[in-house]
Image: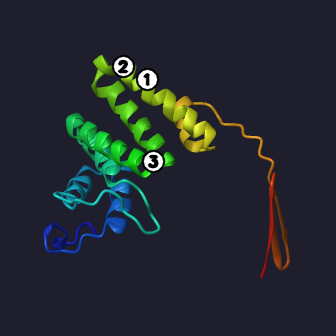
Amino acid sequence: YVANPKYKDENYDFLPWKDIPLLEAAVKVKHHKAVELLLHRFDNSIMKITGGWLSTFINRHTGDAWALLGKPEKARADYNEALEDAYEFEFRPEIALIRFQLAKLLFNSYPEDKEEAQEHLDFAISEFREMKMRPLYKEATGEELIVEDNLSFKFEDESFEYKEEGLHFTVTY
């Protein structure tokens, strides 16, 4: 998909719900060329959030891409814009993710902003714990998050039952 020559064509359809997962994967595997090609797709975009089934803030992902490419000033600008938008939308998981990424960037590229980085990291860790975001909590702290849930699941041949304090429902199929 990324290798498609049309990908650089500005008339080619901009599909953030397809492009963001590709950008995220390219960043994760540190594929610099793919990241560069995909970043081009977001040039001059006014979209802030992908929408649809993958609701995420575009600038969080472009910030990750710029950080990988060694452009901390662009990464910081994108993270700050994403953070402002996430607060406006009151999108709590994204706020925690953005602040975590911003903390990592500040620790690595802006040692003079260590206090700000620590504030972002402390906030993110607290939110990861509160929202039971176990993999991110472990990444941020190096510790396993032990959560004592009051949940019970029960599967039978033709139904599914879910119980939580103050909530109980059964789905029959």
Secondary structure state at the residue bearing disc 3: helix
Quadrant of res 146: top right
* CB-based contact (under 8 Å), mark 2 and mark 1: yes
Q: Residue 37: x, y in percent?
A: 20, 59
Q: Is residue 113 above or below residue 140?
A: above
Labels 3 and 2: the sequence-earlier one: 3
Label 1 – label 3 distance at C-alpha? 18 Å
The picture places residue 100, in percent across and down from the top left corner, at 44, 36
What numbered label is drawn on residue 99? none
Q: Amino acid at mark 1?
A: Gln
- In the structure shown, which secondary structural element does the residue marked by tag 2 occupy? helix
- Residue at image x 85%, y 78%? 157
Q: Between marks 2 and 1, how big is the CA–CA gap?
A: 6 Å
Q: Is residue 144 above or below residue 46?
A: above
Q: Residues within 10 Å of mark 1 (few under 14, many from 20)?
A: some
The numbered mark at residue 118 is 1
Q: Viewer-nearest of labels 3 and 2?
A: 3
Q: Are marks 1 and 3 in contact (CB under 8 Å)?
A: no
The quarter of the picture where residue 159 lies is bottom right
Count neighbours of disc 3 (C-alpha within 10 A) and say few if under 14, some if 14 to 19, many if 20 or more. Answer: many
Query: Where's the C terminus, which quadrant?
Result: bottom right
Horizontal relation, residue 142 to residue 30: left or right:
right
Judge left or right: residue 122 versus residue 38.
right
| Residue 141 shown left or right of residue 94 in the figure | right
- Front residue of 99 and 9: 99
Residue at which label 3 appears: 94
Disc 2 marks which residue? 114
Residue that lies at the very extreme toward the front in this rendered image: 88
Above or below: residue 8 compared with residue 150:
below
Under circle 1, the secondary element is: helix
